[in-house]
Image: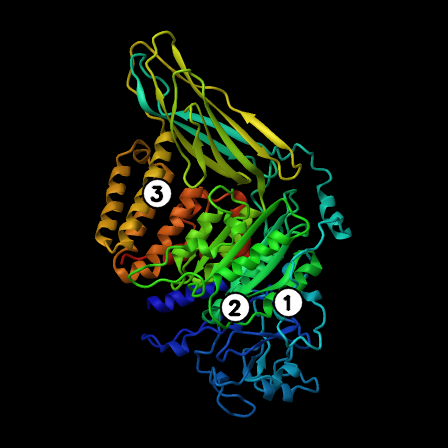
Amino acid sequence: MGSKWRKAKLALGLNLCVFVPRTLEDSPPSSERFSDAALLPPSVYPADWTVASSVASSPTPVPTSPTPAPASPGLRFSKSGSRSSKKTCSICLASMKRGDGHAIFTAECSHSFHFNCIASNVKHGNQICPVCRAQWKEIPLQGPSLDAPHGRARINPVDWAQNHPLMTVIRRLPPPRPDSNRPLYQAPEPAVFDDDESLGQQPELVQRSSSNKNVPENSSARTIEIKTYPEVSAAPRSNSYDNFTVLVHLKAAVAVAGQNVNRNHANLLQISQTPRAPVDLVTVLDISGSMAGTKLALLKRAMGFVIQNLGSNDRLSVIAFSSTARRLFPLRRMSDTGRQQALLAVNSLVANGGTNIAEGLRKGAKVMEDRKEKNPVASIILLSDGQDTYTVSGSSDQPKSNYQLLLPLSIHGGDNAGFQIPVHAFGFGVDHDASSMHSISEISGGTFSFIETEGVIQDAFAQCIGGLLSVVVQELQVGIECVHPSLHLVSLKAGSYPSRVMVDGRTGFIDVGDLYADEERDFLVSLNVPAEFSSNETSLLKVRCVYKNPLTKEMVTLESEEVRIERPEIGGQEVVSIEVDRQRNRLQAAEAMAQARAAAEQGDLAGAVATLETCRRVLSETVSAKSHDRLCVALDAELKEMQERMASRHVYEASGRAYILSGLSSHSWQRATARGDSTDGSSLVQAYQTPSMVEMLTRSQAMLLGSPSAQRLVQPIWSLASKPKPR
């Protein structure tokens, strides 16, 4: 029963047609597989394209005559499990068994026929069902695609209307070329990738940006809010502290003040008009043989979402890799024409070959290196479901460790180079190399996300680009300076952000880089505080932030007020700041995760579980936990989930390692990552989400479910069903 509910849940979440067996027993896997063709909505497969019937390969689009789709949206399930005429073609009376190499056409009246049979029957314009005599609004048109092996069947997007807002771009696809049978990504590549599209203003760019002409320059208030919290506000004069903690809290301003969070469905599906820094994005996509079928179909759909949600100032290039890597097209602005061409290129992908991650990253980095012009924000998205078998080698007794070889020098640049192009890595499924993907992201300054459930890939991409499309601060450097002459810095706890304390111990720096709109950063500064006999207060430190405004390119400097504590003669009870205590708990939990992961890699799963359990017990006794702080509750749930994913070696290898590494990536960068089924709306997933991420995620889910109202109805059941069960 559980497996059938899971299939039904996936169908609700993905708008798929699904076959649920009639009996209480589970049917054989062959009867449970999803149709690869049904996985792609019109947002990826245009209305005037067809898709190969699911035989033994991934769907490959081929052009045919345009056929309108029905106008009634909504969730529909296939009736292939019922006792209907779908088992037998009503024209030739032959069997219509799935996977036998014959394309099947399902009409809007729900009756099915062999495509060849019905195409021949209606070739003269007959639009009446031979079974029920219902009048059809669409008919199967036989085209040249039927000459291909195994036949071709047109996708019938039953859940999307042709007047859907997201169909407007795709409907204007250019007519297919005579040589379109050759995959687009096999076009000859130049030696130098300096053919990126110019950033110069185009007529449509002026038109799109004209809606912002009434927005005042200072309305976005693109600055940083600096707050500081000493661990106690008052300390007796006679007391000295060797490791006194001050929390430095930074928050980037929202992109536009006064945004209305109660957006309707139409607004969600429009391309944002918010003034922001445009992006150069390169996606490096695994199309090895293991991606064939459902995985590739879902990847194409997710890329369709990315393409549609980039603005006309943003530029995109796609690298596809298997045994080798190819650039599908150069950095191209996502204007209407650019989107059309990008969709055509992505839809031409076919899965085969090995997994050469290093070559894919090398080519992706080359696109960034060779570009003639540069948008203010640049990033690489890497997705793979396998392990690199070309660059990094290892054996069971000598694990792969030199993952830096997977990254070209232009990205990591050696120990002294800063992060220039972050790589946001997505490990897809249970067979990917989580250690290598995490290392790639960590070295480059990006995040690592674990996509456990195939259907979550679009949401994972949506969350990522929601952040990339909202960068308001760049090249941020935080300076810490001691004020009192007797003070010295002990440490700067900044996670994965590069930090350093100067030789004199009086100043320190943290290199933060980019901040998304409304994004927050918390750093714990430890210093010694001497006894004070001559004053009623002690000045501790001050904070200075220097950053670049990505739109104006101006450098901005902000300074905080001095951090002081009172020094009474007789001290009362010292109350620890809950803000400081909360961040200590976060760092302690992250440290426990790293220790547990190290123990698990050595084969000591029991020790790893014990480490996590000890951390949970310690956190439960803290001030913030006793006050039911949301972050502490989320940390405890996360640690518990990691314990469950270490129940056995098999469970750890399948999902535990990737889940922990994604959690470490999230906490070390204080940035949201996708973990497991990240659509469950839990506080764990939302810990670092920004409003722009949430909006893009909502937009993705609204596309999958048809409308936000439908999403709200399904979400509570979905959340309950998606909650991991104890292992």
Q: Split into 4 quadrants, where in the image is the N terminus?
A: bottom left
Label ID, residue 297: 2
Element carrying mark 1:
helix
Image quadrant occupied by the C terminus:
bottom left
Q: Is residue 625 above or below residue 426?
A: above
The residue to which callout 3 is attached is: 590
N-terminal-most mark, 2 or 1 = 2
Which residue occupies 52% across, 74% down?
A: 58
Look at the numbered disc 2 and give the secondary structure of its residue.
helix
Q: Amino acid at mark 1?
A: Leu
Question: Would you place residue 452 above or below residue 565 in this image?
Answer: below
Q: Nearer the viewer, residue 130 or 60?
A: 60
Q: Toward the viewer: 364 or 116?
A: 364
Residue at (61%, 68%) from the top-left corner?
185
Residue 619 got which mark?
Answer: none
In this picture, residue 68 sits left or right of residue 426: right
Instruction: Name the kind of residue labelled 2 in the image.
Output: Ala
Residue 593 drawn at (x, y percent): 32, 46
**578 left or right of 167?**
left
Which residue is the site of mark 1?
A: 344
**Which of the two labelled residues, at mark 3 and mark 1, occupies the earlier sequence position?**
1
Distance from Cα at disc 2 to Cα at disc 3: 35 Å
- Which of these two is toward me, 52 or 478? 478
The answer to which image quadrant residue 589 occupies is top left
What's the residue type where badge 3 is placed? Ala
Instruction: Indicate the quadrant where residue 496 lies.
Output: top left
Q: CA distance from mark 3 to mark 1?
A: 43 Å
**Rendered location of residue 623, percent (x, y):** 30, 31
